[in-house]
Amino acid sequence: MQQPVDNRQAMIPETLVLDAQQGDAEALAELVALARPAAEATARRHMESADADDVVQNAMLAVLTKLEQLADPKRFVAWLRQIVVNEVRNEHRGTSRQLHAQLKLFAEPRTARSVQPTLNFRAAIDRLPANQRHVLMHRYVDGNSYAETGANLGISVPLVRSRLQRARMQLRKELPMTDAAKPIDLTPNDLHALVRANRFRANDPKVPFFGILLEAAGRAVATDGHRLLIQEIPALRELPEDLLVEPNGLEDSSFGTEPGSFTTKLDEIEIKTPTDHWAWGIRDDAFPDYRKVLPDSPRLSIEIDPALLRQALAEIEPFLGPRHPTLDGFAYLPTVEIEISTAARRFTLTSTDVMGYQAPGKGVDSRPPPPVSRWEHQASFAIDIVAGHADSFCCFINAHYLADASNAVSEGTPHTLQLFAPHTVIVLKSGDGTRTSLTMPMA
């Protein structure tokens, strides 16, 4: 019996998949664009359309980070569909923050000290218009998704969101600050960790990873799509659930060695120090599953002195932008080549006159013809080999991203740097294991 033809696979040439696997950025962008409709169709066969966007976004992220694992390019669409199905299975529909916790208090035994705030909250709920109260209960008490809430009440998802927003605003007006969750104490180190996370977050609110993820497991996670920072913050273990927050302010200069606290409210968290305070909004969006970009089994793990890495980066900096004139038709990125020799136990950064130029939509190998004069500058330092099965390793990387990653995990003790395939992430871990940063090499 003849097998049915997969028309979607026919639309995605095998050569396009192969080019993308080999690091062609233009081919990868085209592949993702062609793959998205297939991913959306699969997701919507398994779940409500309004809930499918996060699944599709996570699936596209998996394509970007795991494409090299696909052994047979002819099976790309089948592979993609399996990724989407797995995402559907793993999709968790979180309920919300303090509001969820407060509503759950209705059914829990109360001590004499806590009865009045609970009664105040119940009374505020009862005073809401019926349509807002019904949406609130469906979403936060029953734990339904926006789509399920809309289907149960016979209204659209945008109307669900609108009524929830109005309900939150009304509750916030009526409930005193004492009805907020108990403040969580933050050490100066915790505050500095939030500052570091703020530097790694995306600036575009339209991207799915905008904001900082505060995990109840005791971690803060932030990414701008090029760099990812994961930090252990034990105080966050007091959170009842994960929060995605939108930072507003908070810089190193804003505080010294004083401790602080943060309090979870209906739609924001409030961070306080003895001299200042900040309000960070809470987002209802889903943060992509960052664990999917954490690779296993590095080809090489090395131990480096952060002071030596900073010195090498400082030495190479004058040979980046200042030594690369503007060329028509080409953009410049502060690119260096990392070369690691296990035999010599050396870590070398290299910049050349033609390195870092790229044509729009192309990778760093789309270099212009070299100018008349040519030069090369290197900065090198000794390393210790921790583990690995590679004699050497080379890749291109944005020097400024590498500096940011190193600074984010530095506390004076040696870093562990893990290297995988040439076009997968470079991982830096702090000596005590509490901070991990990932940086994507350049194609």
Image: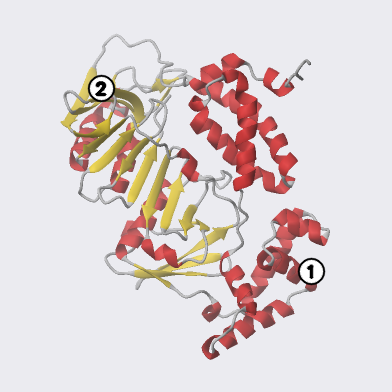
Q: Give the residue at the far right of this rendering.
A: 154
Please state which amino acid type lies under the numbered disc 2. Answer: Asp
In this picture, is 286 found above or below 152?
A: above
Indicate left or right for 404 with 48 as reference: left
Residue for point 25% across, 22% down: 391
Query: Residue 399 location in percent, x, y?
Result: 32, 33
Q: Which residue is mark 1?
A: 131
Q: How many marks?
A: 2
Query: Residue 138 location in percent, x, y?
Result: 72, 65
Residue for point 35% across, 33% down: 298
Mark 1 and mark 2: Cα distance apart in space: 66 Å
Crowd rating for badge 1 (residues with CA inside 10 Å; few <14, some 14–19, many 20+): few
Indicate left or right for 398 with 342 as reference: right
What secondary structure is marked by label 1?
A: helix
Does the image show residue 425?
A: yes
Of the 4 image quadrants, the one containing the C terminus is top left
Q: Give the residue at the far front of this rendering.
A: 1
Please state which amino acid type lies under the numbered disc 1. Answer: Asn
Crowd rating for badge 2 (residues with CA inside 10 Å; few <14, some 14–19, many 20+): few
Query: Residue 63 location in percent, x, y?
Result: 55, 31
Query: Residue 214 location in percent, x, y?
Result: 47, 57
Q: Which residue is mark 2?
A: 391
